[in-house]
Amino acid sequence: MIAFDFEYYEATTLKEAKELYEKAQAMDKKVMYYNGGTEFITFARKGKAYAEVVINIKNIPDCNLLEVRDGTLLIGASVTLNAIVNAGFYPLLEDVVKRIADHTSRNKITIGGNLNSQLMYKEAILPLLLADAKLEIFGEEGIRYVPVQEVFNKKRTLKQGELLVTIQVATENLQLPSTFIKRTKMSKVGYPVVSAAAIIKEEQFRIAFSGVCASPFRSAAIEKILNASDLQIDQRIEKALREIPGKIVEDVNGSSAYRQFLLTQVMEDMYRGLEVGK
Amino acid sequence: MKLSNGKGKMVAPLLINGEIHDVIVRSADTLLPILREQLGLTGAKQACQNGDCGACTVLINNQPSHACLSLAIETVNQSITTIEGLSNSPMQEAFVNNWAIQCGYCTPGFIVNSHALVTNHPNADDNIIEEWLQSNICRCTGYEEIKMAVKSVLKTSSE
Ligand code: FES
Ligand code: FES
């Protein structure tokens, strides 16, 4: 049971959502946007999330787009992970989201919710980082468009009161050679000890990671090394490991030494899978 | 559209198993206790309350969903089916006939999910069956019999 009460609203337009948010803020109330709600409900039950006003944005049509328009795939923030898989637009994104939680949960978890998760994994970000996706964000000054790297790479998130409307990916980036590897501690369903997604674009290897550091990342320095054709694959990996942009996580799922070991394996498997260096 | 007040409660009309039921909810109530405690629909079981076990699975708009992970208030205007709405369904019979049951605590969740599986994928292969059934955990019987139950319904409907 959630041990606190909150006001609950369902907004049907972006404008309405913003007005409700600002009204709550003006009254000094702790306010939150609500999408799939799986994280809010589980966290609130454990006392790890709190809100006095909850604004459900799931009925806003803009947040439910899932279509290709003028060479761009638009994915609304309220689209569920299963809907993304069923739509079949972006194979790498499908591979990644198919491994987030379990099938029943994926009927409720939205892509916007995954990207805004308080947990460190946010794996849906990986294909978006690789494809240089853009985000349509609605906030104080109306709509703005921002490269995904600027908002969700490393620890950054949306600003207070901002709402993710759509994720936009150029169609030329949807069908590139790609691979995704996720290693969990025990069962297939679970948080990653290490997960990584990679693509080949213009003969260059791009890679993004989750589960390794305190937040997912894609690093230009790592990619430069991994694309250095004058080095052997194992030399590249060894050098790339030195460029991990933060402390490697050490937790109940695995020590940092074990994660580092897995990272080496995962990168080797990815090179092999994508036939890089042949 | 304002649907509920802070500490107040509201009467919410929920469409469950084809009938409208008026229930009294706090905004913070999840669907699971409302089904069980206000409507006596105790088939959906409470276990982890965390979306991990699938014991509370119901159908929302014909898709499996954890009743512990939906606010009751957000299911207004949705169509909810509980295990009670699948009474005497082919999947229920298949679970009985294949002995896909032991203590029975997980069984309603499995049947609801499996029913949705064969409805959505009448030609489901082993990969799809595995993907869907990963959502439910059973602590006492074998998963093999459960898979056999699912396959027996798929087979009958394809004949
Ligand atoms: S009680 Fe809902 S998934 Fe376990
Ligand atoms: S039959 Fe006992 S938990 Fe599944």
Image (spheres, grey):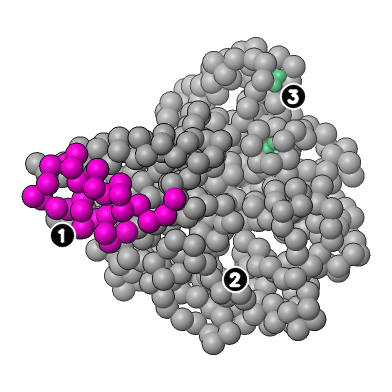
Dot 3: chain letter:
B
Q: Are marks 3 and 2 on the same chain?
A: no
Apparent side of residue A54 relative to residue A159 in the rendered image (left or right):
right
Q: Is residue A257 above or below residue B94?
A: below
Which element carries disc 2, helix, strand or loop?
A: loop
Horizontal and vertical percent position of residue A117:
57, 57
Q: Residues within 10 Å of mark 1 (few under 14, many from 20)?
A: few
Q: Per the image, is A214 magenta?
A: no
Res. A66 visible in picture: no
Q: Is residue B121 above or below residue A138?
A: above
**Residue in the image at 46% along x and 74% along y:** A136
Residue at the disc numbered 3: B105
Q: Residues within 10 Å of mark 3 (few under 14, many from 20)?
A: some
**Residue in the image at 68% along x and 68% along y:** A32
Respond yes or no on whether mark 3 lies under 8 Å from ligand 2. yes
Apparent side of residue B129 relative to residue A168 in the rendered image (left or right):
right
Label 3 and label 2: CA atoms lie apart by 38 Å
Residue at the disc numbered 2: A60
Apparent side of residue B82 relative to residue B116 in the rendered image (left or right):
right
Q: As shown in the figure, which amino acid type bears the numbered disc 1?
A: Glu
Which element carries disc 3, helix, strand or loop?
A: loop
Residue B12 in which image quadrant: bottom right
Q: As shown in the figure, which amino acid type bears the numbered disc 2?
A: Ile
Q: As shown in the figure, which amino acid type bears the numbered disc 3?
A: Tyr
Which element carries disc 1, helix, strand or loop?
A: loop
The answer to whether the residue labelled 2 contacts the one labelled 1, judged by CB atoms less than 8 Å apart, is: no
Disc sitting over residue B140 in the figure: none
- Which residues lie in the magenta part? A219-247
Residue at the disc numbered 1: A202
Horizontal and vertical percent position of residue A29:
78, 74
